[in-house]
């Protein structure tokens, strides 16, 4: 929660100084060619700053700095307890800069300021805290060999880790990778999305202030097909951890194959099914929670429950509740603490999202709420919360990830049909089922092919559980102790002790 008013936030926004150069080896630097790109705020279409546009040469410099830092042990060689202290200090510094970081995020990618402060910044600080706290409490193994040997199974950091992240939770998606990667002793090169580079650049400076040595955390800003590709194809990057679209995730597999077979982690798109059954005791509650989950963060959520699969007997009631909740998500000024629905990240994305309204209409769905752009006078990119009813699962709006505030309602006869529809997708990230019937809850959650199944809730979450998907939603998991596996290699050391 924030105690600042809309006017306070606008005043603060006017005084904000953005970091806009790449961050390599502990210093802000221009790109070697001097090229930049414009960071435009989706709130009002105004220029925030010009950001360094890094090419292959800049990526080489960042990877070299990260390699040197890794090899000389300035971070990788520190005892885990020391890395813990520094990561926890970093978390404290992030908390101390809450308003500044939240404001950067909101101005750069359009989400409501109340979400940036109470969700994004808080979760980022918690993430560094959690992995810092964990790293001096995990043990390696001794294998159960015969008496004449001691075989150690140890986890070692990969070395130079690259992270390429999207714009929907710019700092948080970076933190989910940075925190376990740094905790395990790696050096990192982060590439934020070009739509939202500014918070990562500020975070890098705060990391240095916390005591993470120069060269250990570098940020290269630029375009995906140039900067991201250069990291993906780099021969001296040991692991690349990506969050973004399924299409770009597939490119990273190619980059890895074409270069040094670097280890990959892919957190990709989703088209999450949310099944509401008549056997749940409170249809209204299920529908309210579900609608809030759809419209939260402008629907720019990989886990957005964008396919609402509902039993026919409660279909009408559920749609009425969705329409009612949609009224709370009228797009507003993202710097107003009462706004629930901010701006879409940019005009290109807003145009793409609006294209789904046309396709829904052409393919025969009913548009029962929204379907229009909003707040044209602001100069920003806003879209009304939108409900497509009577959707068939074969329609474009049921198959493609929209990544906007839109839901497709698919009526079904019963739980069996619901599961069939739920699994009829190339994705498998999140899912949900609402029922009070214990065996139905177990049967459906077992049958759904997805990395996460929520029963009688949606988007419930903390650092203790893995996050990631089946099928084309990705490979590997963020969060929880399992994330340490991504950023480490197992090493067997077999010691012959004779006898
Ligand atoms: P995107 O795939 O377009 O971009 C993600 C990152 O990849 C950006 O940094 C971008 O610059 C870079 N990139 C783009 N093209 C590239 C290329 N050819 N080579 C190398 N790098 C390239 O995704 P986006 O639009 O930023 O984010 C939305 C997507 O992210 C959605 O599909 C969403 O579901 C997904 N997402 C997934 C998770 C998850 O944990 N599974 C979380 C958040 C977002």
Image (spheres, grey):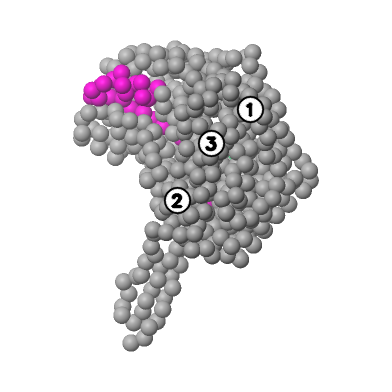
Name the mark on residue 98: 3
In the current view of this chain or complex, which residue is farthest to the right? 33
> Where does residue 160 sit, x and y in percent of width and height?
58, 57
With respect to residue 270, does 352 lie above or below?
above
Q: Earlier in the sequence, mark 1 or mark 2?
A: 1
At 23% from the left edge and 23% from the top edge, which residue is drawn? 281
State yes or no: residue 156 in magenta: no
What residue would you read off at disc 1?
Answer: 13
At 34% from the left edge and 37% from the top edge, which residue is drawn? 453
Q: Is residue 381 visible?
A: no
State yes or no: residue 277 in magenta: yes
- Please, what secondary structure does the residue beneath circle 3 have? helix
With respect to residue 148, does 125 lie above or below?
above
In what quadrant of the picture does the C terminus appear?
bottom left
In the image, the residue with mark 1 has its CB under 8 Å from the nearest atom of ligand 1: no
Which residues make up the magenta segment?
264-291
The answer to the question of whether label 1 and label 2 lie on touching residues, with beta carbons closer than 8 A, is no
> Where does residue 151 sit, x and y in percent of width and height?
38, 73
- Please, what secondary structure does the residue beneath circle 2 have? helix
At 36% from the left edge and 31% from the top edge, which residue is drawn? 458
Mark 1 vs mark 2: in front: 1
Left or right, 51 with reference to 438 = right
> Where does residue 94 sit, x and y in percent of width and height?
53, 42
Name the mark on residue 131: 2
Q: Residues within 10 Å of mark 3 (few under 14, many from 20)?
A: some
């Amino acid at each position: 929660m924030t105690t600042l008013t809309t006017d306070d936030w606008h005043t603060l926004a006017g005084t904000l100084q953005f970091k806009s150069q790449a961050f390599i080896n502990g210093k802000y630097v221009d790109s070697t060619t001097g090229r930049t790109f414009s960071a435009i705020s989706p709130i009002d279409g105004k220029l925030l700053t010009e950001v360094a546009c890094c090419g292959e040469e800049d990526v080489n410099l960042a990877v070299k700095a990260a390699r040197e830092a890794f090899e000389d042990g300035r971070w990788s060689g520190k005892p885990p307890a020391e890395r813990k202290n520094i990561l926890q200090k970093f978390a404290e510094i992030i908390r101390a800069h809450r308003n500044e970081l939240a404001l950067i995020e909101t101005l750069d990618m359009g989400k409501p300021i109340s979400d940036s402060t109470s969700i994004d910044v808080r979760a980022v600080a918690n993430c560094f805290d959690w992995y810092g706290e964990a790293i001096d409490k995990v043990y390696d193994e001794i294998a159960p060999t015969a008496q004449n040997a001691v075989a150690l199974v140890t986890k070692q950091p990969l070395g130079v880790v690259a992270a390429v992240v999207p714009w929907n939770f710019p700092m948080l998606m970076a933190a989910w990778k940075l925190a376990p990667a740094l905790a395990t002793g790696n050096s990192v090169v982060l590439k934020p999305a070009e739509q939202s580079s500014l918070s990562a650049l500020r975070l890098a400076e705060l990391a240095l202030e916390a005591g993470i040595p120069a060269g250990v955390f570098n940020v290269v800003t630029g375009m995906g097909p140039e900067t991201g590709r250069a990291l993906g194809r780099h021969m001296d990057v040991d692991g690349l951890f990506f969050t973004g679209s399924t299409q770009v995730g597939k490119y990273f597999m190619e980059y890895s194959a074409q270069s040094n077979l670097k280890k990959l982690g892919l957190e990709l798109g989703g088209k999450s099914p949310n099944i509401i059954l008549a056997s749940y005791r409170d249809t209204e509650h299920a529908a309210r929670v579900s609608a809030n989950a759809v419209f939260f963060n402008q629907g720019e959520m990989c886990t957005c429950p964008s396919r609402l699969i509902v039993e026919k007997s409660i279909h009408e009631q559920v749609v009425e509740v969705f329409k009612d909740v949609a009224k709370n998500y009228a797009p507003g000024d993202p710097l107003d603490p009462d706004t629930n629905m901010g701006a879409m990240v940019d005009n290109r994305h807003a145009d793409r999202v609006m294209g789904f309204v046309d396709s829904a209409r052409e393919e025969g769905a009913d548009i029962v709420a929204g379907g229009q752009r909003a707040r044209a006078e602001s100069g920003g990119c806003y879209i009304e919360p939108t409900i497509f009813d009577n959707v068939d699962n074969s329609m474009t709006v049921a198959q493609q990830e929209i990544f906007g505030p839109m839901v497709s309602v698919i009526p079904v006869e019963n739980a069996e049909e619901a599961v069939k529809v739920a699994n009829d997708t190339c994705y498998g990230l999140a899912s949900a089922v609402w029922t009070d019937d214990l065996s139905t809850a177990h049967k459906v959650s077992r049958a759904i092919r997805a990395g996460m199944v929520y029963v009688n809730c949606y988007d419930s979450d903390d650092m203790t559980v893995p996050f990631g998907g089946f099928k084309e939603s990705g490979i590997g998991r963020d969060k929880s102790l399992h994330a340490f596996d991504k950023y480490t290699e197992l090493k067997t050391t077999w010691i012959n002790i004779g006898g």
